[in-house]
Image (spheres, helix red, strand yellow):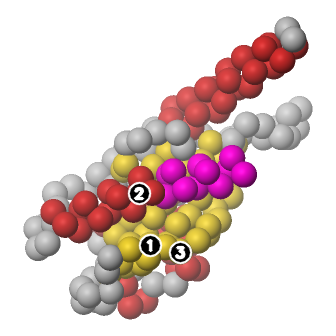
């Protein structure tokens, strides 16, 4: 149940940011690294699996230690205004033989497809790190491994505080 609340919170943040972007960038070119942005598939060629593959390729560009493993899942689709949004979650952890089950940190992605713009235009993609409000654009943001570590550390601290409270009662 709590996990579904995270989906809703993170997804709503991404949808809001994408809708704002659509309203403010009617025909403007955005500055930044166009090489990554240009690599996103055209709307007409998008499928859930293509989106998953492209997000995997994008994650491979992140400079994170090889000890970070992740699973990538398609979560669901939502529709709002003239757009369809495809939601994905990449769940990261650093398992090892001594502790194969570790804490996780999720990165949520939203892929936006316009129902009214030319289908030859590329899909738009944004992402947000679990429990953060800052929405990132692939190609404009340099992903920081520290973001993942911070999420896992804050969860561990919270778990420790809850355990301490429950053991004192």
Asked whether 64 falls inside the magenta stretch, the response is: no
Please report contact status of discs 3 and 2: CB closer than 8 Å, yes or no. no
Please report contact status of discs 3 and 1: CB closer than 8 Å, yes or no. yes
Check disc 3 and report the residue beneath it.
Answer: 77
Mark 1, Cα crowd under 10 Å, few <14 / some 14-19 / many 20+, is: many
11 with respect to 117 (left or right): right
Residue 2 position in % (x across, y down): 69, 47
Which residue is found at the position 62% from the left and 67% from the top? 75
Quick one: 94 or 3, which is closer to the camera? 3
Which residue is found at the position 26% from the left and 87% from the top? 116
Q: Is any part of residue 110 visible from this angle? A: yes
Check disc 1 and report the residue beneath it.
Answer: 85
Give the CA distance from mark 1 to mark 2. Answer: 9 Å
From this view, report whether residue 72 is shown above or below residue 68. Answer: below
Please report contact status of discs 1 and 2: CB closer than 8 Å, yes or no. yes
Element class at badge 1: strand
Residue 100 position in % (x across, y down): 85, 40
Element class at badge 2: helix
Mark 3, Cα crowd under 10 Å, few <14 / some 14-19 / many 20+, is: some
Which residue is found at the position 45% from the left and 49% from the top? 128
Q: Which mark is residue 33?
A: none
Of the image marks 3 and 2, the number of the one nearer the N terminus: 2
From this view, report whether residue 164 is shown above or below residue 102. Answer: above
Quick one: 38 or 113, which is closer to the camera? 113
Mark 2, Cα crowd under 10 Å, few <14 / some 14-19 / many 20+, is: many
Of the image marks 1 and 2, the number of the one nearer the N terminus: 2
């Amino acid at each position: 149940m709590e996990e579904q609340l995270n989906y809703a919170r993170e997804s709503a943040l991404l949808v809001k940011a994408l809708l704002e972007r659509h309203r403010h960038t009617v025909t403007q070119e955005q500055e930044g690294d166009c090489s990554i942005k240009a690599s996103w598939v055209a709307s007409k060629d998008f499928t859930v699996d293509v989106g998953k593959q492209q997000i995997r390729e994008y994650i491979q560009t992140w400079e994170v230690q090889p000890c970070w493993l992740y699973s990538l899942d398609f979560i669901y689709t939502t529709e709002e205004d003239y757009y369809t949004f495809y939601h994905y979650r990449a769940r990261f952890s650093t398992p090892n033989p001594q502790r194969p089950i570790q804490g996780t940190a999720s990165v949520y992605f939203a892929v936006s497809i316009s129902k009214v713009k030319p289908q030859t235009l590329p899909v738009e993609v944004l992402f947000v790190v679990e429990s953060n409000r800052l929405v990132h654009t692939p190609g404009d943001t340099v992903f920081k491994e520290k973001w993942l570590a911070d999420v896992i550390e804050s969860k561990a601290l919270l778990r420790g505080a809850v355990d301490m409270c429950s053991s004192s009662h």
